[in-house]
Image (cartoon, helix red, strand yellow):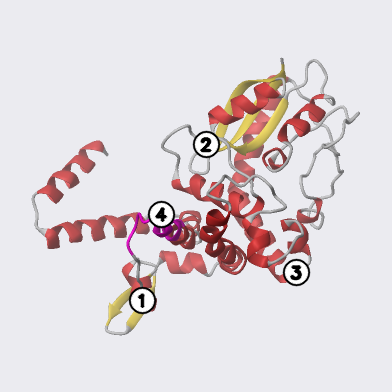
């Protein structure tokens, strides 16, 4: 691969502008042709996030204006293929977009997330470009002119909530398989028995229709003898949640956290865009490896190991124990 990259760079340095553009277009078409449906959806559904960040940059006088045109625009990016004058054909990317779960993802991110991204520049200016931390005063509340929590609002809007659930279901199929494989392997190594009905779910309404569940209160001390934690930790009062989960642990217990663990540098674009999505929707964040170590250390936990099961999203299982 390194030799191929060097060859392309050498070729690009020795051709004129037309030749250089041909190389760029050829490489882009090659990248699109080997995309999986997940790759296509992850790239496309956050395109408005890119323009939003650029829009914020305009206020800071960093970037020029951007323009685009409908079908010719889509064709120019390989979303569809122009095979003749005013004649367009489907590509592998086009077919991915119409798959039910992926289509729901596009609808959710455009219909629901779109207004959030569009409000981001104004929100950042009004808050003097401070990092959002209050989930009751996030970009979401400003964009949708409400004072209720994000998931409360979604439950009040069934169509939007259905888009969300469909998208969560399809995008997590691969994640779930990777997680279950990694978790089962770790449980075997640690000698942890199978414990039925012991899962803790962050937001019950998002899973109650699909999975029988038992709620575990994590904002107050619990007498539960076994608990697993997940994305609740990144949303609100993380140290309180971690400390209360520790109260449910035995001496030999392990805390397994299923979440994203971003690299401390050169983070993959699929991870960085989700981090900003968390920011606008929940005034929350995806943590870097260093930030996870700092958080768990402050809560009295040591990280034993981090197993990453999806590289692009950096979805991982953090194994932690009390100090």
Is tag 4's residue or tag 2's residue first in the polypeptide sequence?
4
The residue singled out by tag 1 in the image is 69
Query: Which image quarter: residue 27?
Result: bottom left
The residue singled out by tag 2 in the image is 262
At label 4, counting other C-alpha atoms closer than 10 Å, the crowd grade (few under 14, some 14-19, many 20 or more) is few
Q: Nearer the viewer, residue 62 or 216?
A: 62
Residue contact at pointers 1 and 4, CB within 8 angstroms: no
Query: Which image quarter: residue 84?
Result: bottom left
- Considering the image in quadrants, where does the C terminus appear? top right
- Considering the image in quadrants, where does the N terminus appear? top left
Query: Which image quarter: residue 115?
Result: bottom right
The residue singled out by tag 3 in the image is 158
* Point 87% across, 43% down: residue: 214
> Is residue 192 depicted above or below 103 in this figure?
above
The disc at residue 60 is 4
**Which region of the structure is painted magenta?**
53-64
Is tag 4's residue or tag 3's residue first in the polypeptide sequence?
4
Is tag 3's residue or tag 2's residue first in the polypeptide sequence?
3
At label 3, counting other C-alpha atoms closer than 10 Å, the crowd grade (few under 14, some 14-19, many 20 or more) is few
Helix, strand or loop at disc 3? helix
Q: Nearer the viewer, mark 1 or mark 4?
A: 4
Which x, y percent locates residue 34? 37, 54
Is tag 1's residue or tag 4's residue first in the polypeptide sequence?
4
* Point 74% across, 57% down: residue: 151
- Cα separation between marks 4 and 3: 38 Å
């Amino acid at each position: 691969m390194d030799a191929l990259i060097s060859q392309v760079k050498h070729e690009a340095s020795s051709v004129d502008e037309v030749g250089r553009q041909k190389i760029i277009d050829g490489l882009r078409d090659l990248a699109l042709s080997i995309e999986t449906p997940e790759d296509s959806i992850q790239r496309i559904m956050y395109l408005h996030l890119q323009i939003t960040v650029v829009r914020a940059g305009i206020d800071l006088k960093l970037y020029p204006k951007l323009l685009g045109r409908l079908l010719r625009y889509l064709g120019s990016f390989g979303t569809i293929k122009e095979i003749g004058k005013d004649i367009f054909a489907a590509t592998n990317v086009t077919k991915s977009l119409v798959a039910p779960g992926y289509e729901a993802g596009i609808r959710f991110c455009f219909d629901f997330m779109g207004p959030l991204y569009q409000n981001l520049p104004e929100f950042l200016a009004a808050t003097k470009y401070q990092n959002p931390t209050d989930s009751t005063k996030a970009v979401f509340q400003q964009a949708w002119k409400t004072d209720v929590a994000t998931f409360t609002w979604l439950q009040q809007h069934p169509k939007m909530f259905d888009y969300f659930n469909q998208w969560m279901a399809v995008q997590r199929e691969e994640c779930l398989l990777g997680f279950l494989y990694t978790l089962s392997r770790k449980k075997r190594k640690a000698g942890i028995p199978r414990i039925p009905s012991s899962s803790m779910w962050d937001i019950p309404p998002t899973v109650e229709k699909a999975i029988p569940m038992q709620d575990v209160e994590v904002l107050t001390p619990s007498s539960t003898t076994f608990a697993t934690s997940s994305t609740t930790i990144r949303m609100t009062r993380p140290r309180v949640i971690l400390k209360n989960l520790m109260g449910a642990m035995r001496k030999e217990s392990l805390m397994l956290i299923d979440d994203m663990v971003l690299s401390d540098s050169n983070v993959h674009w699929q991870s960085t865009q989700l981090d900003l999505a968390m920011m606008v929707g929940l005034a929350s964040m995806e943590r870097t490896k260093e930030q996870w170590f700092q958080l768990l250390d402050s809560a009295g936990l040591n990280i034993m190991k981090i197993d990453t099961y999806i590289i692009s999203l950096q979805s991982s299982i953090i194994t932690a124990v009390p100090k």
